[in-house]
């Protein structure tokens, strides 16, 4: 993996905080506050685009992707997100990270 573990952890925390600001767990987990799947996708993709704008494409193997996904899931879980959103965001994060900036 091309990230040092410290740089990676900082990136994960930053992305999770930005998602928390734009789509807080209290909103994400409240069935009374309906946010469309398209809007959620926009928020997640825009957050990743900003956070990864200067990062080169990363060649990450299966084990690296699994570790990154688990770490990002842990960050979101600690913030209080539901598993459905965590799965969605973690999958999108890994796809965006391995794809590089576009």
Image (cartoon, rainbow, N blue to C red):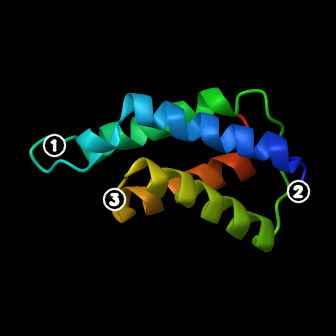
Q: What residue is drawn where x is 44% and y is 58%?
A: 86
User: Which quadrant does the C terminus fall into?
Assistant: top right
Disc 1 is placed on an element classified as loop
Of the numbered discs 3 and 1, the one sitting upstream in the chain is 1
Q: CA distance from mark 2 to mark 3?
A: 29 Å
Q: Where in the figure is residue 69, as x and y percent of width and height?
A: 63, 62
Residue tagged 3: 82
Quadrant position of residue 60: bottom right
Of the numbered discs 1 and 2, the one sitting upstream in the chain is 2
Quadrant position of residue 41: top left
Q: Is label 1 in contact with label 2 (beta carbons under 8 Å)?
A: no
Quadrant position of residue 59: bottom right
Judge whether 1 appears above or below 70 on screen.
above
Q: What residue is drawn where x is 38% and y is 56%?
A: 85
| Relative horizontal placement of residue 36, taking residue 95 as reference (left or right) | left
Judge whether 88 appears above or below 25 on screen.
below
Closer to the observer: label 3 or label 1?
Answer: 3
Mark linked to residue 1: 2
| Relative horizontal placement of residue 72, taking residue 102 as reference (left or right) | left
Residue tagged 1: 34
Disc 3 is placed on an element classified as loop
């Amino acid at each position: 993996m091309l990230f040092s573990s410290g740089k990676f952890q900082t990136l994960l925390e930053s992305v999770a905080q930005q998602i928390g600001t734009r789509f807080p767990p209290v909103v994400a987990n409240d069935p009374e506050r309906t946010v469309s799947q398209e809007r959620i996708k926009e928020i997640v993709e825009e957050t990743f685009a900003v956070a990864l704008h200067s990062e080169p494409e990363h060649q990450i193997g299966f084990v690296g992707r699994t570790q990154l996904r688990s770490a990002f899931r842990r960050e979101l879980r600690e913030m209080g997100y539901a598993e459905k959103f965590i799965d969605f965001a973690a999958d999108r994060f890994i796809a965006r990270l391995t794809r590089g900036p576009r």
